[in-house]
Each structure stands twice: as C-alpha cells, then as structure tokens.
Amino acid sequence: MEHHKKYNVILADPPWKYNFARQIKDRPNKMQIVETHYPTMNLSELKNLNIESIIDKNCVLFLWVTSPKLDNGLELLKSWGFEYITSMVWDKINMGMGYWTRVQHEFILIGRRGKVSPPRLQRSSIINIKRFGHSKKPKEIYEIIEEMFPKLKKIELFAREKREGWDCFGNEVESDVQLIAKSKTQGVQK
C-alpha cells in the first residue's frame, strides 16, 4: 500500500449516516436502517478524513449523494477543497424507498480543484439504468468517467469491488491507499 500517491480523478460513494429509521411493513419488530448493510459515517467523520493526502493539485471529484444528503454532499465537497461545478443524475427507473417521496434517483456532484478543463467528450447529465440492489452503483459510471478523463489517475473511495485501471479505498476491498482521519492515527473505512 502506497502512502504518497496523488490522484486527478476521485469517485466517492460515502457511507452516509441517516438519522432516521423506518419500520418494515408487516414486520413490526424490524426497522429499515442503512447500518444493516454497512458501517456508516456522519458528516464530521467524512470531513475529517485526510483526503488532502491523496488529491493532486488538479483534480475532479465525482461524489455520490442521495436527495436527503444533498446539502451534506455540497458541504463535504467544499470541505475536501473542491469547487462545485455541475451534477449528474442516475435515474434508477424503478421507485425505491422514501420518506417524503418514493425516490428513484441519486445525484453525482461534480467538483473541481486547480486547473482541470472540461472533458472533450461531454455526456448527458442523466444516466438511465435500472437499480439492482441497495447502494450498488451502475458500472457505466466508471465507463463515463474513463471516457471523460482517459489519461488521468483515478481512485474510488468507499469502493465495494476493484476495477481495472483504478485504485481503491474501502473496507470491502484491498485498499491501495490509507486514509487516516486528520486528528486520529487510524483510518476510517466503509
């Protein structure tokens, strides 16, 4: 594991902590909470990760965020040193769970730091791909990013599986880097 690598492209799917749970229909003793799928992190824990240690001075960030966490996503993006540029939307085709509405989309916030030019190949901001499991993201997002920035060094944060040509960080994969919390001596992983 190298500690000095710097990346120009970051795809991050933070394990957002939600402050609500929902009773599962027809199962009065069962609650639906994210923590049943994976450990989560609150906004301050995410902001406290030493992202600076792996970011090149010229870098683009693709940050997954759900509707209830949109304001947290923008705050996290800025705290990691990025300027918000634009977004993409993953239309999951089928409705999912929700608390005010039955959500069928997620956002990918795009931020930039330093001198990163817009890609020559510009894709639609809408990705229409059917959902296929809790928190599982479409593989097509990797292809889109690879087409947009083919020669830049890439890493996925909070990765669930390894992808060829990308480094990764997460507790479900063998990480290529270590992210240590700024005020702690141990890293925090999804």
Image: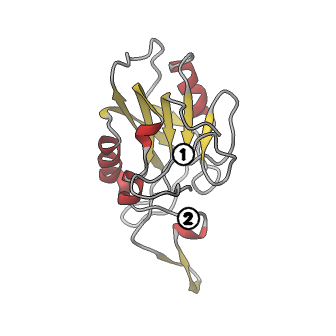
Element under disc 1: loop
**Image x and y of residue 50, in percent:** 43, 46
At x 55% / y 64%, what residue is drawn?
A: 39
Examine the rendering and report whether any part of residue 37 can be seen. Answer: yes
Q: Which mark is residue 39?
A: 2
Snapshot quadrant of residue 190: bottom right
Give the residue type that dot 2 points to: Pro
From the top left corner, tell me how far across and down residue 81 is, in percent.
32, 37
Kindly identify which residue carries mark 1.
Answer: 93
Q: Taking the image as drawn, is residue 130 in sight?
A: no
Residue shown at the point (63%, 31%) measured from the top left: 166
Q: How far apart are the two marked residues, 2 and 1, measured between alpha carbons?
A: 27 Å
- Residue at far bottom of view: 29
* Near-viewer residue (139 or 96): 139
- Count of marks overlaid on the render: 2
Amino acid carrying mark 1 in the image: Ile
Name the residue at 40% across, 52% down. 182
Quick check: 116 left or right of 135?
A: left
Q: Residues within 10 Å of mark 2 (few under 14, many from 20)?
A: few
Using the image, determine if residue 121 lies above or below residue 25: above
Q: Is residue 142 left or right of residue 61?
A: right
Q: Secondary structure at mark 2?
A: loop
Q: Position of residue 78 (x, y in %)?
A: 29, 41
x and y, in percent, of residue 93 in the image? 54, 45
Foreground label between 2 and 1? 2
